[in-house]
Image (spheres, rainbow, N blue to C red):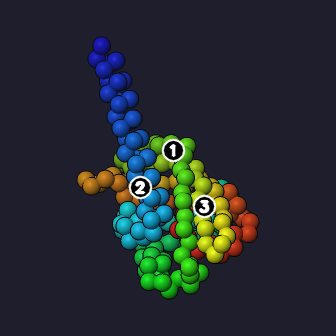
Amino acid sequence: MAAQADVRSTALETLLLRERVESFVFQEARLLDERAFTAWLALFASDATYWIPCGHDATDPMQEVSIVYDRQPQMRERVWRLESGLAYAQEPSSRTAHLLGNVEIALEDDGGVTARSSFLMTEFRRERQLVHAGRCLHRLQSTEDGFLIVLKKVDLINNDGHLGNLSVLL
């Protein structure tokens, strides 16, 4: 009986963790769609990385070309430009809608959590609608206040094709 109770307890803990992780990832997407970039930035750890590789199956941003490879200082600069109106590629500002799905989670040996998901992000700007699609990997660290993003890797399905001016946060 004790083993059965342990299995139920573990299953419940896994289900609750999955719910917390999904809520966190959905919150991040909502903040981007609301253009709440400062609040979005607050979701990242001080040593976080936001990475959009340029090729399929990229594993090392130091050895491969990136569309975006931002550490915290570059992320703050990007957010400042978007909020200050000095991101001329975002004049007028894009309106976006993120759709996330297929969220899978895994516990890491260091106590962190990895979340993998698929996404569609529709962007509308200057009478033109674009669709960006791909997969995200979030490495999360658990804190007393919730999760912080240590790594967000965005693998666009067309990352080795023509992207035009990708001036939005994915």
**Mark 2 residue crowding within 10 angstroms, few (<14) / some (14–19) / many (20+):** some
Label 1 or label 2, whichever lies nearer to me, is: 2
Q: Position of residue 119 (x, y in %)?
A: 58, 53
Looking at the image, is mark 1 or mark 2 earlier in the sequence? 2
- Regarding residue 74, the answer to whether it shows in the image is no
Which residue is identified by label 3? 122
Which residue is identified by label 2? 27
Q: Position of residue 35 (x, y in %)?
A: 45, 69
Q: Are marks 1 and 2 in contact (CB under 8 Å)?
A: no
Q: Residue at x 54, y 59 (%)?
A: 97
**Mark 1 residue crowding within 10 angstroms, few (<14) / some (14–19) / many (20+):** some
* Amino acid residing under circle 1: Val
Judged from this view, the residue extending furthest toward the top is 1
Which residue is identified by label 1? 103
* Residue 1, above or below 60: above
When asked about the image quadrant of residue 131, the answer is bottom right
Q: Viewer-proximal residue, 139 or 41?
A: 41
Q: Measure the alpha-carbon separation of dots 1 and 3.
A: 19 Å
- Regarding residue 122, the answer to whether it shows in the image is yes
The quadrant of the picture occupied by the C terminus is bottom right
Q: Is residue 122 left or right of residue 24?
A: right
Q: Position of residue 70 (x, y in %)?
A: 50, 72
Q: Residue at x 63, y 57 (%)?
A: 133
Q: Viewer-proximal residue, 102 or 14?
A: 102
